[in-house]
Amino acid sequence: MAFIKYHKLKNLSPIGKWLVEYTDELDISITELARQANLAQGTLR
């Protein structure tokens, strides 16, 4: 899901790459992960 959207971006930080891989494993969006963590929607983007 997120990986398909972000895998072509070469300038992702290590934490950014981890977030993309992690959300793919959970099959949720980065926005949904932020919501579940009680963060603003754009925080993890």
Image (cartoon, helix red, strand yellow):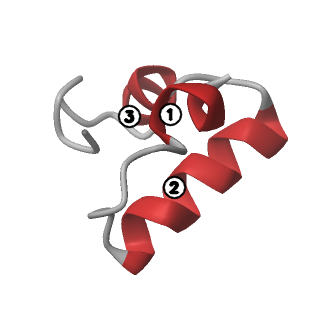
Above or below: residue 45 compared with residue 21? above
Query: Would residue 28 appear left or right of 15 to someone viewing this image?
Result: right
Residue ID at (78%, 26%): 27
Residue 37 spot, x, y in % from top left = 43, 40
Residue matched to label 1 = 33
Q: Quadrant of residue 14?
A: bottom left
Q: What's the distance in space between the residues labelled 1 and 2, CA to CA?
A: 9 Å
Mark 3–mark 1 CB contact (< 8 Å) = yes
Q: Residues within 10 Å of mark 3 (few under 14, many from 20)?
A: some
Residue 31 spot, x, y in % from top left = 39, 23
Residue ID at (31%, 72%): 13
Q: Nearer the viewer, residue 8 or 3?
A: 8
Q: Residues within 10 Å of mark 2 (few under 14, many from 20)?
A: some
Residue ID at (18%, 41%): 43
Residue matched to label 2 = 19
Answer with mark 2 or mark 3, whichever residue precedes in sequence: 2
SS state under label 1? helix
Residue matched to label 3 = 34
